[in-house]
Amino acid sequence: MAKKTEQPAEPTNPYKERRWMKPSKRAKGYAEERKAKVHKFGKKEGEELSEYDKGIRSGYLLCQSDHAGLYKFKKAISEGKTTDEAFAISKTKGKGNNAA
């Protein structure tokens, strides 16, 4: 019995294997897709976003914003800030000045 020594062909689909993304990178991609109103990744690349897909991206971006706000709030509380100061800090966007 002869064994086959041929190597299988390289996969042509770049999305065949699962790829984990950092939440900030996924959010950046979702924001770009929402602005362009088309899919930029995956099987539907180039197709227009449906209302459902727009909602998924909006929800994900809102969720990331909520997580960031809660993180900032808990960090400010652990640093000894008052609840009102921590709440104000949690509402700021970006890495700006966290001093209240």
Image (tube, grey):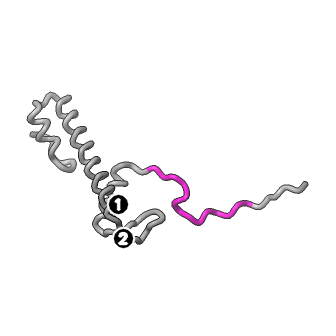
Q: Which residue is mark 1?
A: 53
**Which quarter of the image is occupied by the C terminus?**
top left
User: Is residue 25 found left or right of 91 in the rendered image?
Assistant: right
Quarter-wise, where is residue 2 in the image?
A: bottom right
Q: Residue at the spot x=41%, y=71% of the render?
A: 46
Q: Position of residue 24 (x, y in %)?
A: 33, 51
Mark 2 element type:
loop
Mark 1 element type:
helix
Q: Position of residue 53 (x, y in %)?
A: 35, 60
Q: Position of residue 22 (x, y in %)?
A: 39, 49
Q: Is residue 10 magenta?
A: yes
Number of numbered tags placed on the structure image? 2
User: Gap between marks 1 and 2, in whole Å?
Assistant: 9 Å
Q: Amino acid at mark 2?
A: Glu
Q: Residue at the spot x=40%, y=71% of the render?
A: 47
User: Is residue 61 found left or right of 20 in the rendered image?
Assistant: left
Quarter-wise, where is residue 71 in the image?
A: top left
Q: Amino acid at mark 1?
A: Asp
Quarter-wise, where is residue 4 in the image?
A: bottom right
Look at the image and give the residue range highlighted in magenta.
7-20
Q: Which residue is mark 2?
A: 48
* Main secondary-structure element of the magenta-colored stretch: loop
**Which quarter of the image is occupied by the N terminus?**
bottom right
| Crowd class of label 2 (few under 14; some 14 to 19; many from 20; radius 10 Å) | some
Q: Residue at the spot x=27%, y=42% of the render?
A: 67
Q: Is residue 29 magenta?
A: no
| Crowd class of label 1 (few under 14; some 14 to 19; many from 20; radius 10 Å) | some
User: Is residue 30 found left or right of 100 in the rendered image?
Assistant: right
Q: Residue at the spot x=8%, y=35% of the render?
A: 84
For this orientation, the residue located farthest to the right is 1
